[in-house]
Image (cartoon, grey):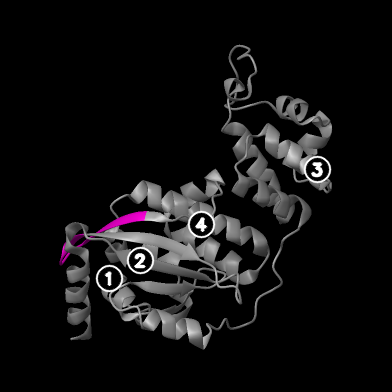
Amino acid sequence: MRRRELADFLRTRRAALTPRDVGLPEGGRRRTPGLRREEVAALAGVGTTWYTWLEQARDVRASRSVLEAVGEALRLTPAEHRHLVRLGRGEELALPGPQREVVSGTLDRLIANLGANPAYVLGRRWDYLAWNDATAALFGDPAARPPERRNHVWALFTDPERQALVTDWDDTTRAVVARFRGDAARHVGDPAFEELIADLKAVSPEFRRLWKRHEIVGDLVGRKVLRHPDVGLLAFEHAALRPAEAPEQRLILYSPLPEHDTASKMMRLMAAWRG
């Protein structure tokens, strides 16, 4: 399965480049978009047959230095480079996770005491492990979902109320799938991941389309604007952090900005949610 993932990743990255991107002449019309295999092989300093075997998911194993050369030839980002090495070498892979992931008591109390700042913890498969009242008031209460569907990616692509909050749908979904794909690469063959991915492909054409792109990005920080049906626009500083004691977990924090009177709107949403 890892070889198939690697082959798909290489093909999509090669198809995304033009000869001009890598300083090669256009060379007339091409039957398919992107670079040719022999061009990537030449840029990386490897044999065309060997590179072709990689894209055909043959049972070949490359050294890390060779994979780095292929990554340079394909103009990969740092996050994509790491992804390539994981798939090509099986390195930096996490050990299988426990049957039940647990959030530390300290972290659980921390997010509970953040008041009107939405915060939640995602597990290795992006399942919701812990969240505070502000999260439930803004995004909907994960506890209202069946345990097997308390998942961030599933909520984004299947819940109309969650989707209605998003003001930059294309950018958000593209980034979420690219980050999730990077995490899934650490668990190729894990039945829990494979089942979730298969279910998402079955119910969401948009997820299916983005998954085929095989894009990879790392965690991002920045500004997030949401639109709530009851209070209108809200603006937040947004960050994703990984607890040192549980690096496969992800702490997501939203800090209200002064714009759109976000802090007072969050207080209203929390008051309404608590009844």
Dot in front, 4 or 1: 4
For marks 4 and 3, give the CA distance. Answer: 25 Å
Mark linked to residue 254: 2
| Picture layout, residue 46 above or below residue 147 | above
Q: Find disc 4 in the rendering and name its residue.
A: 219
**Residue 227 occupies quadrant:** bottom left
Do residues under tags 4 and 2 come within 8 Å of each other at their CB atoms? no
Q: Position of residue 64 (x, y in %)?
A: 80, 47
Q: Position of residue 125 (x, y in %)?
A: 55, 69
Magenta highlight on residue 9: no
Left or right of 260, for residue 18? right
- Label 4 packing within 10 angstroms: few (<14), some (14-19), many (20+): some
| Picture layout, residue 240 above or below residue 114 | above
Do residues under tags 1 and 2 come within 8 Å of each other at their CB atoms? yes
Q: Earlier in the sequence, mark 1 or mark 2?
A: 1
Three-letter amino acid code of the residue under disc 1: Leu
**Residue 158 occupies quadrant:** bottom left
